[in-house]
Image (spheres, rainbow, N blue to C red):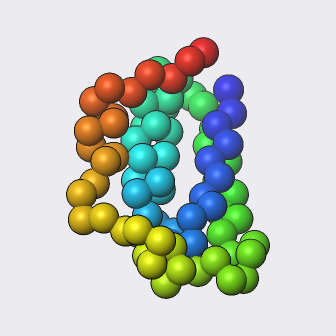
């Protein structure tokens, strides 16, 4: 099994989507420990979308990664 992990956020590892994706990859690896994770950072493909732009769009102080991971459902 292979897991393709795309990192697309202009905030990179500081983003909520990155933290959530790490949780999902972790759950997948728990269910399939021999899986190979392929990481493809594709952030920065659109030069006008950077961390400042993403923050201006609506950064919140509340993290949703923790609450979503408790209710995580990954269809097979």
Please determine whether, in this image, residue 59 is positioned above or below residue 73. below
Left or right, 2 with reference to 56 = right
Residue 22 placement (x, y as % from top left): 45, 47
Q: Nearer the viewer, residue 22 or 70?
A: 70
For this orientation, the residue located farthest to the front is 57
Q: Nearer the viewer, residue 31 or 23?
A: 23
Left or right, 32 with reference to 67 = right
Residue 27 quadrant: top left
Residue 49 placement (x, y as % from top left): 64, 77
Residue 23 placement (x, y as % from top left): 40, 41
For the point 66% across and 69% down, the residue is 43
Left or right, 41 with reference to 63 = right
Q: How many marks?
A: 0
Residue 8 quadrant: bottom right
For this orientation, the residue located farthest to the right is 45
Left or right, 2 with reference to 19 = right
Residue 51 seen by the camera = no
Residue 5 seen by the camera = yes
Please determine whether, in this image, residue 40 is positioned above or below residue 47. above
Residue 68 placement (x, y as % from top left): 33, 36
For the point 69% across and 57% down, the residue is 40
For the point 24% across and 57% down, the residue is 62
Please determine whether, in this image, residue 58 is positioned above or below residue 26. below
Q: Quadrant of the C terminus?
A: top right
Q: Nearer the viewer, residue 41 or 30?
A: 41
For this orientation, the residue located farthest to the top is 76
Q: Quadrant of the N terminus?
A: top right
């Amino acid at each position: 099994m292979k897991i393709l992990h795309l990192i697309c956020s202009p905030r990179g590892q500081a983003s909520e989507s990155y933290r959530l994706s790490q949780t999902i990859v972790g759950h997948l690896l728990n269910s399939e420990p021999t899986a190979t994770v392929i990481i493809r950072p594709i952030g920065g493909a659109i030069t006008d979308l950077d961390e400042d732009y993403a923050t201006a769009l609506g950064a919140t102080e509340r993290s949703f990664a923790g609450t979503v991971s408790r209710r995580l459902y990954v269809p097979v």
